[in-house]
Amino acid sequence: MSATTPRTPRPSFAIGTVKVRPGHTREIGLPITKLVTGSEISLPVRVIHGRHDGPVVWVNAAIHGDEVVGVEVIRRVLSRLSAKTFRGTLLAVPIVNVHGFMAGDRYLPDRRDLNRSFPGSARGSLAGRIAHLMMREVIDKCEVGIDLHTGSDRRTNLPQIRADLDDPRTRALAEAFGAPVIVHAKLRDGSLRAAARERGATVLLFESGEAMRFDAWAIEAGVAGVLRVLAALDMVDADTLNNDALATPPPVLVSRRTGWVRARRTGIVNLDATLGQRVEVGDRLGGLSNSFGKTLRLVKADRSGVVIGRTTAPLVNRGDALVHIAEIEGAEPPGIPDHPQAAEAFDALDEISVL
């Protein structure tokens, strides 16, 4: 009888003051501060520590308190996962900006933007302390992260990934996510993505939908994308996706340059442009009028590409951002697909035009 080497059990995962055993899920609260009533405010984290070895990944949402789409994305993703079959470890943080989320506010009580406060400091402002806690207990333990966002300031966004496309691993995971468009985006000082990249993590930033709205199409794109990334990292089996459309990432369009068409006059805007729409230079996107309906100015595309964002505000001032257009790589002439995958991606965009 041949001897076999006994398998070494996977160690428990330490976070905060607790340890999560392999094959188990644990919800914990990492203390942030106290309210004036004495009630404690904590950073909510669910740890799925799989029985089998694999990457350590985080997914977070609501770093801006009014961005609720990602919270629902995480809830639905977690409902599909089991620590018994999971490979690796997932740290899910559905609400990073707890104060803002409770108030329905993008910012913290002192009006600081949490996503400009990383990596933070243990003795800094409230924003700095939350950022420091997130870095120490979550990000520093992980090799890959997905940061979920929505449009801000009465804007809505097409599902899209923003990432460093010059990094091969980041680009591969961005393509695996399967959002209609992936955008090469520079790092912003103080952002979670910049701080995490500085620590060596691979980070995808997902944008989809509008603040304070549960847009079904935005949520579904996020759920599918997160599950595809977990599958690409071999953390879940294909049958976890339970759908051929989820298991196989659709073709994506790549952009390295985007720009906003801005209001040339102050007035009331009526936009015809829809998310995912293909446009060419000079195409009409809408019009600006005064309160009596007199047309003051037409809104026209200043570049060819795909509409990836637009304002939802009817009243605009001169200079306000109206329509966000992404120029697409590999299109010749601009905005026209020149290969089958691009054509399929444009067809997919047509199916999810929502406004």
Image (cartoon, rainbow, N blue to C red):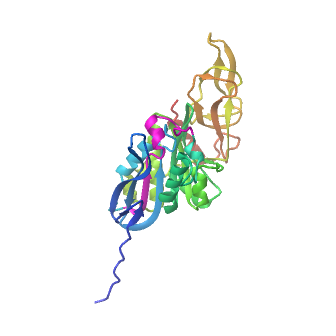
Q: Position of residue 107 (x, y in %)?
A: 53, 38
Residue 74 in sight in this render: yes
Q: The magenta stretch spans which residues? A: 86-111
Give 350 or 259, whichever is nearer the viewer: 259
Residue at the spot 45% in from the left edge and 45% down from the top edge: 95
* Left or right of 213 on screen, residue 276: right
Q: Is residue 268 part of the magenta span, yes or no?
A: no
Residue 181 in sight in this render: no
Q: Position of residue 190 (x, y in %)?
A: 62, 49
Q: Position of residue 328 (x, y in %)?
A: 65, 44
Q: How many marks can you see?
A: 0
Residue at the extreme left? 1
* Left or right of 173 on screen, residue 223: left
Identify the image quadrant of residue 103.
Answer: top left
Q: Position of residue 195 (x, y in %)?
A: 59, 55
Instruction: Tell me: residue 330, above or below residue 158.
Output: below
Give 127 or 24, whichever is nearer the viewer: 127
Give 44 or 149, whichever is nearer the viewer: 44
Residue at the spot 40% in from the left edge and 59% down from the top edge: 236
Q: Quadrant of the N terminus?
A: bottom left
Instruction: Tell me: residue 7, above or below residue 161.
Output: below
